[in-house]
Image: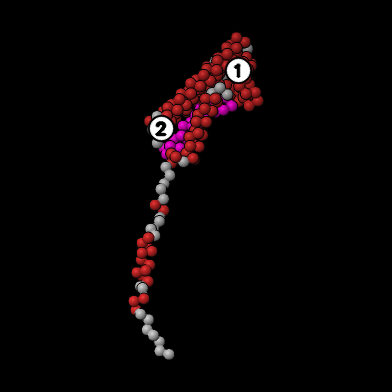
Amino acid sequence: MTDLPLPTDFALPLTDAAAPLGDAIPAVGLSAIPAVPLELGLPTLGLVALAFILLVAGVAGSVVPVLPSGLLSLLGVLTYWFATGYEEPGLFLLSGLVTVALLAMAVEWLSGAISAKAGGASTRTTVVATVAGFIGLIAFSVPGFLLATAGVVFVLTYAEKRDAEESLRAAGVTLLGMLTSNVLQVLLTAGVLLVMVAVALV
C-alpha cells in the first residue's frame, strides 16, 4: 500500500494557534489588586473606638482613683494618633495633649505627698501617709484613700509634735489638697477628651 502524502495546508503552526489565546489572557500581578485604604478598615475603626474608650476612662479615673486617669488619657491620644497613620492630631497639638496628660499623671500620683508637705508634715510622715493611702485605696476605694492618708498624717504629726491643732491643720490641708487635685484632674482629662473629639470631627 502506498502512503498518501498529507496536504500541507492542513497543518497549522502551533505558535500561531496559541498566540490569540495567550493575548486574550492578561497577566495578573499583585500590583493589579487595589489596596484598601487604612481609614476604611475595620481594625482602624476598632482602634479609634478603643482610643475614645481610654479617653473617657481617663476622665472617670479622675473621680475614681483606682483608674489611672492621666495614663489612660495619654494612651487614648497615642492610640488615636497610631490609628490615623500618625497624621492626626498634628505634632504641635499632639505634644500639647501629651504634656497635659503627663501633668494629670503628676497631679494624680504626687497630690497626697505634696499636700502633706504643704500641711507641715515631715518627710517620714509624708512617705508613710502615701503608702497608707495606697493601701486604703485598694481596700476601701476613694473613702479609704482619703481617710487613710489624712488619718496617718494626723497621727504621726501628733506623735512628733504633740500638738493637736497643728496635727489637725496638717491633716486638713492634706485632705483639701487631694480633693483639689481630683478637680484639677477632671479639668485636665476632660480637656484632652474634648480636644480629641474636635480632632475627630473636623
| Disc 2: which residue | 89
Residue 122 percent across, percent down from the top left: 56, 19
Quadrant location of residue 11?
bottom left
Rounded to the nearest angstrom, the CA distance separating label 2 from label 1 is 41 Å
What amino acid is at disc 1?
A: Ala
Task: Count every numbered label the image shows and give the total.
Answer: 2
From the image, which quarter does the C terminus lie in? top left
Query: Residue 38: percent from the left, percent from the top?
Result: 43, 41
Relative to 162, 12 lies left or right: left
Dot 1 corresponds to which residue?
150
Q: Residue furthest right?
A: 139
Count residues near mark 1 (Cα–Cα under 10 Å), then give few for <14, some for 14-19, many for 20+: many
Within 10 Å of disc 2 (Cα), the crowding (few <14, some 14-19, many 20+) is many
Q: Is residue 123 visible?
A: no
Amino acid type, label 2: Pro
SS at mark 1 in the image = helix
Outermost residue, bottom side: 1
Q: Residue at x 49, y 40 (%)?
A: 43
Please tell me which residue is depicted at 62% across the width and 15% down the height of the picture: 154
Task: Tell me residue 39's x, y (percent).
Answer: 43, 39
- Give the residue drawn at x 60%, y 19%: 146
Q: Residue furthest top?
A: 165
The disc, 2 or 1, on the residue closer to the chain's N-terminal end is 2
Horizontal and vertical percent for residue 190? 48, 23
Front label number (2 vs 1): 2
Is 84 magenta? The answer is yes
Q: Which mark is residue 11?
A: none
Q: Is residue 169 above or below residue 131?
A: above
The image quadrant where one finds the N terminus is: bottom left
Which residue range is magenta in the image? 65-86
- 63 sits left or right of 32 in the view: right
40 magenta-colored: no
